Image: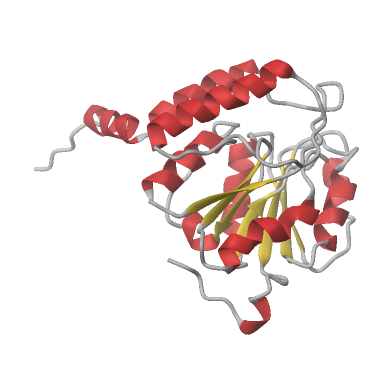
Amino acid sequence: MPNEVGLGQLDGSRCLTVVIPAYNEAATIETVVERVLASPHTGEVIIVDDGSTDGTREIIQKIDDPRIRVILQPHNQGKGAALRRGFAAATMPYVVIQDADLEYDPAEFGELLAPLLADKADVVYGSRFLGGRPHRVLYFWHSVGNRVLTLASNMFTDLNLTDMETCYKMFRREVLESFTLEENRFGIEPEITAKVAAGRWRVYEIGISYSGRTYDEGKKIGWKDGIRAFYCIVRYSPIGERLRRRRAPIRTTG
């Protein structure tokens, strides 16, 4: 179900909405936005500040570029809630998630876009575990956890992804418009994957570089999010959806 694009967008120029959820990222947000705007593929940038208290929202409100739209959440609600706001506001043919830190490189947007522009894919994941791209060496157990979650997700979705938890997920906009997202925090990652699989959208993976950060540098995801991810893998799977429908109260009339 490919989206029609104008002749000027066949090469991917200015066809991409970049959604940036941000929470207390004053140290990196300006540099991230500069790198996103430097991409020839960026048509609009939607920054959703999720109730930051460290000066992040003041920084983004001062960035002067007509492609930037700022949405201010009244209080911290989580990455999933921020992404829902950003996705709903997107207007470009393609949409990508960009974290507000410096772990992922917007210079790689073109490679993620290529299968979409060639009408080979509806969704593209940027995998940190594919190819020979440079990676900062950090936490062993985080790597194990990511692979275990990806394996569990694959078992329930019948996809063969290598990196379900990656930030870099790029979509045709109509893919995001085809389902309703519910998770407020990091459970949004397995939820998106489950609903993409349920919609039978064409999925590609592209190897990307990764410059991970430490907790001292602002990393926020923790072991509780891993437990929630397992729950979401099951909940949003076909099995979980059937169980939810069975438990739903039956409404009677008359």
**For the point 74% across and 37% down, which residue is it?**
51
**Residue toward you, 104 or 77:** 104
Q: Return the x and y of residue 104 as percentages of the image width and height.
A: 77, 43
Q: Please, is residue 171 above or below residue 180 in the view?
A: below
Q: In the rendered image, which quarter contains the N terminus?
A: bottom left
Q: Please, is residue 134 above or below residue 179 in the view?
A: above
**Residue toward you, 198 or 246:** 198
Report which quarter residue 55 is drawn in: top right
- Residue farthest to the bottom, as pictured: 7
**For the point 72% across and 61% down, which residue is it?**
110
**For the point 69% across and 36% down, which residue is it?**
75
Q: Is residue 29 left or right of residue 89?
A: right
Count of numbered circles on the image: 0
Q: Return the x and y of residue 199 as percentages of the image width and height.
A: 38, 51
Q: Is residue 58 left or right of residue 179?
A: right
Q: In the rendered image, which quarter contains the C terminus?
A: top left
**Residue toward you, 59 or 174:** 174
**For the point 84% across and 51% down, which residue is it?**
60
Q: Return the x and y of residue 83 as percentages of the image width and height.
A: 61, 46
Q: Is residue 90 visible?
A: no
Report which quarter residue 187 is drawn in: top right
- Residue farthest to the front, as pictured: 132
- Residue farthest to the left, as pictured: 254
